[in-house]
Image (cartoon, coloured by chain):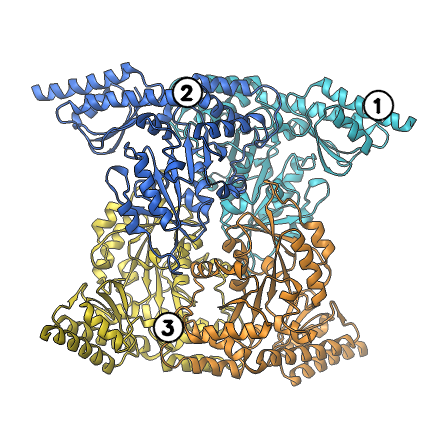
Chain colours: A blue, B cyan, C yellow, D orange
C-alpha cells in the first residue's frame, strides 16, 4: 500500500541472491574483482558499443560524479528546473564539480525542448559568465514523462553545436526503456548521450547504480573523483553483484515493465474518476494526479502512503513489487470516497 | 591464504543474515526506518552516553564527513604523516571540508605524542595560517600499534587546550578495543574524543561504518554534508542492518578477537624465524615484518597474498575469517624457505 | 562619449590624491595601518552604528566573500535572476562559499517582492534541499531601478522570518543613496540588511570596495576567507586610502549625484524622442532604453560607446565624470538620426 | 628603520608616476586596455620567448591561480615545507585548485634537491593517492637563499620525468635575478619552469604581480579562475600601469640590486659581530641571523622593526628604499649592545 516512492522497496529476489552468492570467499578489493569486470561487459553487450562503466552506490553520487567529469569548476550545467540534480541533491553537483553552476530551465511536463536549450546557452568565451559545459536531461523525467529517442537526439544536437557534453540522469532509465520499447542504445549514445547515470536501486537493487561513459575519454578522471568522494567501496563486489543480478536475464526490464503496467492501470483508473485529473501523461511508473481532498484523507485513513507535493496533488509511484491488489484497493478507496461525496 | 587486507573478506554470517532479513517488506527511505534508529540506540548502550550516530557506507566517507563537521574550510587538521586520511583517501577530507589542510606529523610506529602535537599546533588567530581545528588520531594505528586510553587522553588534552576537536579514525576500532580489553567509552569520549569513525566493513560487514558524535552539537551539519556527498542511501536499512547484525551479541568483538589472536600467532611465529624481524609491535590484527626476499618469493609461489609496502617489508592482516590453518601454513612456508636458505 | 559603463573611468581627483599621499613612508602591512582603521571609523560615523568593515579590491570579491560568511556550503542564496552574483561573476559565490547554490528568482525591473521571495523559500530542514541561508538584493538594481527603504525592510522581514541573512550588493549603493535622498542607515541596517557590499570602484575609485558587516558576529570568519581568496593586500593602505578619499567630504555622494543627474537628463531626452522607449524607470545612473537601429548605428559612427545587451536595447551608464556636453551630444545625435528617418 | 618586510614600503616613484598617468581618461575595462597588452609585450621581450601573462594584484592570488591551472582537484603539489604556499596563504591553493593537496618536503636552507623530490613523488595512477601534478619552487627561497639555473633545471628534470608541471613562486624573483646576474630566461623557461609568479609588490609596486605562462596551453583556464576568484579588476589598467612602470628602464632590477646590496652589507656586518651567526647564506635581500637577546632588545628600544620568527632568530629584509643610514644604524646599535655586553 506504499506508493510514496520506488525506493521503499527491498531488493528483488534475483538481486538479493546475487549479493548473497557474491559474499562467499575472498575477492580483490576496490573493484579489482571479476564481478565488477563482468558488469562492464554486460553493459557493453547491452548497449552494443564500447564504453566505460563504474558501479556506484547512490543515484546522487552517480549524477554528481558523472558531472564532475564533464565540466570545469567554472562551468554551467543546463537542466530542467525540476531536475533531481537541481532540487533534490543538496548541492552534490556543486560539491563534486568544485562549484559549477546549475542553470535551471523551465519546460512543460518536466521536459526541455531544443528551443528552450538553444535560448539558454550563452556566454561562451565571456569571462564574466560560467562557461557552457553540460546539458543534463532526465529520462524518465521528474514529471513521470518520457523523452523519445528523437527528442533526445534533437536536444543533444543543440548541445553538441555549442560544444556541450550530454548527461542523462537515468534513475528510472529502465522504466523509460521498458515503456518506449526501444533499445538502450537508441535512448543514449545513438541519440548523442555522453554519460548515463543508469539507476538500479529503485528498480530492484539495494544500493547500486552504474555510471556509463559512452565518451570513454571523459571517464579518465572518474576513478579519482569517486575515491575522493568516498565512493570507492573496498568490497565493491557487493555493489557489482547487485548489478550482475539486475542485468541477468532481463530482470531489470521485467521489473520496470511491471511497475509501468501498474502505474498505467492506476492512471487510467484515476483519470476516470470524477474530480480526478492527471497532471502529466503517466508514461512510465509515476502518476501525477489531482485528487479531491476528501479522497486523499480517506486514502490516508485506509493506510495508503504517497507524496502530496502540493495540496491536492499527488505523486504515486509503482515499483517492481507493487501488487495488483494494492492498485485495485487504491482505486476502489478513491472511487468510494468520491461517490460518497457525489451522493452527499 | 589472503593476508593482503581485512577488506578482501565477505560479510560474516550474522551480518549477512541481518541484511537478508532487512530486505523484506517496505521501509521509509533515507534512514527514517526503525533499523537505523535501533543502531543509534545500540551505540548509546555500547558507549554508555548520549550521542548521535549515522551509518555510512565507506571508511573514507566516514572520516571525511566527520572532519567536515569539525573544521572550517580554512582549518588545519593535524594527523600522523601515515594517517589514512593523509595518504589513502585521494584528498577526500580536502573535498568535503571545502579545502582544509592536513598537517602531517612524524611519529614512531604510527603514533603521535603530546609533545609532537604541542609543537605542531600554531598560528591560531594569525590570518596567514590555516586555523588549528582538529586533531585526528587512528586507533588501531596505520602501523598496527595501539593507543591506550591514557595516551588518547593526553593527546586530547593538548588538543582541548588549543581549542581543537578530536577525531578518531577507528577503521579497526574493534581490534583496538578487543586487544586492549578496555571499554569503548574509555577509548573515546572518556578520553576526550569528540567524533569516532567506527569501522565495521573490514571486521565482518560489507559496506558499513558509523560516524559517532559524542559532541552532539558537532553533528548538526552532518546530514547535509552526507547528502551532498551522495552518501545518504535511500534504502538505508541495508547499511543499518549490517550494523545491527554487527553489534548484536558482540559479533564485532568476537570477530576482532579472532583476528587479533591469529595476528598475534603470526607475529610470534615470524619473530622466531631467522632473518625475520617485527618492524612494529603487532598489537592488534596487523603484522609489519621484515622477511628475507627468498621467503617472500616462496610465499608468493605458494599462493599467499600480502602487501609488500617496501622491498622485504610486509604487511600481513588477519581478519574475522582468517583460518588457523592459513596462519600455520604461512609460518611453515616461511620457515621452510628460510631453513632451506640456511641449509643452502 | 563612453556610456558603456561607469568602470571605464579613472579615479576622481580626491581619491587619486589620497592614494598618492598614502604612498609615502612605511606602514604596517595587511591592514594593520592607521588608514585602514580610519576607514572603519568613517563608516561607523556614516552609518551611525557599530559595525565591522573591510576594504576589498573588487566588487566580485566583495560579494563572494560576504556571502561566504553568511551561508554554509550546503546553503541556498536567493537572488534576482539578473543579479550580478548570478550572471556576471563566473561562479565566484559558488567558489568562495564552498558550493552554495544561487536560486534565481524572476521579478519585474530587476526587483524582487516579498511575495516572490516568500514563495521561493522552502526546504528548511529537509536534507535533500540546499538550506535557505541568504537573501541577496542589489540596490541600485541591475536594471537601474531602486529599492526604497520600506521595500528593503519588507523583503528583509520575509528573510528574517525564515532565518535568512540579508546581503545587499551595493556596487552602485552611492547612486541609490543619492537618488533616494535617504540616509545610508535607512537603506541598510535599519531596514534589516546584515552585510553590505559598499561599492566605490565605479563611482570614483580605482579598485576599492568595502564589505560592511552590520551583523558583527557574521564577520568572524571574514579575515580568513579574504586571505585564502588572495584578497588580503600586503600594502592595504593603498586600498584604504582610496576609500578614505572617497568618504571624505561627501565625495562619494557628490560623484553619485552628478552621475544620477546626467543619467536623468539622458533618460528624459531619449524618452521624448520618437521610437525611443525607456525599458525601466531610470532611477539612478543607468538608462535602459529601446532605440531604433538606425540611431544606434549613427551613434556608433559618431564614436559613442555603449552596451547593446539585446538588439535595439541599450544600457547607458553615467559616471562621476560624464560631461554635460557628452549627454547633449548623445541626445542630439539620436534626435538627428531619428528626424532624418522620419523625414526620409 | 623597518626591516620587518619589503612589504612595508610604498611604491617607487616610477611606478607611482605610471599609475597616476594611467588614471587619465577612459579605458576599456577588465584588461582590454592598451596598457595591459603592453605588459605582456614587455614580458615577451624580457624573457625572449612567447608567453601569456596576466596582471594580478596579490602574491597569494598569483600563486593560487597559477596552481589552479596546473593541477586537477585530486592532484598533489610538491613543495618545501616552508614554502609560502604551504604556510602563509591560509589554504588559498587548496581553495582555488578545488582541494589539491600540498605535500610538504624538508630541505636545507629553504631548498629542495632532485633527490628529495624524486623520493617524494609517488602514487601516480593509484586511485587512493592524490595524483602527482606540480612541483612548486620558490626563488629567492623563503630562507633568503637562491636556486641557480642549473639547480632549477635539475629539479625540473625530475618533475618532467614524472609528468609534473613546474611552478616558480617568484615573489622576490627580481632579487634572485639581480643577485645571480643571469637572465630571467635562464632562471625560468630555459630551466624548465612552466609558470612563474613574478612578484612586483614587494619590490616597488603597490599591488601588482604577473602570472607568466611559458606553457601557454596551461593558461587556457586562467581567465575563468581569475574571474571567479574576484581577481579580474574592472580598472585593470591601474594594476598594469604599475607593472609597466616597474619593467620600464630596468626599474625592477635597479630596485632589487639596491635591496640585495644593503642586505649583503647587513649580513656581512652582523656576521662579524660576536654572538651573531648567519643561519643561512644571505644571498639576496633577506638576512636570517641569530642575535643575542640583549641586542634584540636594544634594537627594539631604538625603534627598529623586524621579525623574530623564533627566540633569538631574526629575519631582516631590505627593500628598494632601505637606506644605507638605516643599515649602518642597525649594525652600530647591535655592535654597541654586544660590546657593552662583552664589557659588562
Whether labels 3 and 1 share one chain: no
Q: Secondary structure at mark 1?
A: helix
A333 or C343: which is nearer to us? C343
**Structural distance between the alpha carbons of marks 2 and 1:** 52 Å
Whether labels 2 and 1 share one chain: no
Q: In the displayed image of the protein, which residue is found farthest to the bottom?
A: D325
The reply to whether dot 3 and dot 1 touch (C-beta < 8 Å) is no
* Label 2: how many Cα within 10 Å (few below 14, some 14–19, many 20+): many
Vertical placement of D55 versus B176: above or below?
below
- Chain of the residue that carries numbered disc 2 in the rendered image: A
* Quadrant where the N terminus of chain D is found in the figure: bottom right
Q: Is residue B298 left or right of residue D223?
A: right
Residue at the spot of label 1? B336
- Chain of the residue that carries numbered disc 1 in the rendered image: B
Q: Tell me what residue is drawn at x 20 percent, y 22 percent.
A: A268
* Quadrant where the C terminus of chain D is found in the figure: bottom right
- Residue B233 rendering spot, x and y as whole percentages: 43, 31
Q: Secondary structure at mark 2?
A: helix
Q: Is residue B210 left or right of residue A323?
A: right
D245 or D189: which is nearer to us? D189
- Depth check, mark 3 against mark 1: the one in front is 3
A242 or D15: which is nearer to us? A242
**Structural distance between the alpha carbons of marks 3 and 1:** 81 Å
Residue at the spot of label 3? D28
Q: Tell me what residue is drawn at x 25 percent, y 80 percent.
A: C326
Vertical placement of C182 versus A285: above or below?
below
Q: Quadrant of residue A297?
A: top left
Amino acid at each position: 500500500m506504499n506508493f510514496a516512492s520506488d525506493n521503499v522497496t527491498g531488493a528483488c529476489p534475483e538481486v538479493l541472491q546475487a549479493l548473497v552468492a557474491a559474499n562467499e570467499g575472498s575477492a580483490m578489493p576496490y573493484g579489482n574483482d571479476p564481478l565488477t569486470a563482468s558488469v562492464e561487459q554486460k553493459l557493453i553487450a547491452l548497449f552494443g558499443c564500447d564504453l566505460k562503466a563504474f558501479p556506484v552506490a547512490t543515484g546522487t553520487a552517480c549524477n554528481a560524479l558523472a558531472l564532475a567529469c564533464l565540466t570545469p569548476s567554472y562551468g554551467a550545467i543546463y537542466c530542467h528546473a525540476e531536475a533531481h540534480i537541481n532540487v533534490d541533491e543538496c548541492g552534490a553537483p556543486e560539491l563534486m564539480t568544485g562549484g559549477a553552476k546549475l542553470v535551471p530551465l523551465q519546460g512543460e511536463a518536466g521536459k526541455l525542448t531544443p528551443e528552450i536549450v538553444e535560448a539558454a546557452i550563452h556566454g561562451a568565451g565571456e569571462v564574466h559568465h560560467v562557461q557552457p559545459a553540460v546539458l543534463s536531461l532526465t529520462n524518465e523525467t521528474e514529471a513521470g514523462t518520457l523523452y523519445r529517442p528523437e527528442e533526445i537526439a534533437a536536444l543533444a544536437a543543440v548541445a553538441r553545436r555549442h560544444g556541450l557534453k550530454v548527461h542523462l540522469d537515468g534513475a528510472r532509465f529502465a522504466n523509460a526503456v521498458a515503456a518506449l520499447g526501444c533499445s538502450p542504445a537508441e535512448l543514449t549514445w545513438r541519440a548523442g548521450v555522453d554519460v548515463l547515470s543508469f539507476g538500479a536501486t529503485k528498480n530492484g537493487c539495494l544500493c547500486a547504480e552504474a555510471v556509463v561513459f559512452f565518451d570513454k575519454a571523459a571517464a579518465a578522471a572518474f576513478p579519482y573523483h569517486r575515491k575522493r568522494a568516498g565512493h570507492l567501496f573496498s568490497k565493491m563486489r557487493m555493489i557489482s553483484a547487485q548489478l550482475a543480478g539486475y542485468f541477468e536475464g532481463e530482470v531489470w526490464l521485467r521489473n520496470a515493465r511491471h511497475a509501468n503496467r501498474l502505474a498505467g492501470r492506476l492512471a487510467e483508473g484515476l483519470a476516470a474518476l470524477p474530480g480526478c485529473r492527471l497532471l502529466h501523461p503517466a508514461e512510465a511508473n509515476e502518476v501525477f494526479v489531482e485528487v479531491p481532498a476528501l479522497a486523499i484523507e480517506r486514502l490516508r485513513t485506509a493506510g495508503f502512503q504517497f507524496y502530496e507535493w502540493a495540496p491536492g496533488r499527488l505523486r504515486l509511484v509503482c515499483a517492481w513489487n507493487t501488487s495488483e491488489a494494492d492498485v485495485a484497493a487504491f482505486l476502489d478507496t478513491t472511487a468510494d470516497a468520491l461517490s460518497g461525496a457525489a451522493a452527499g
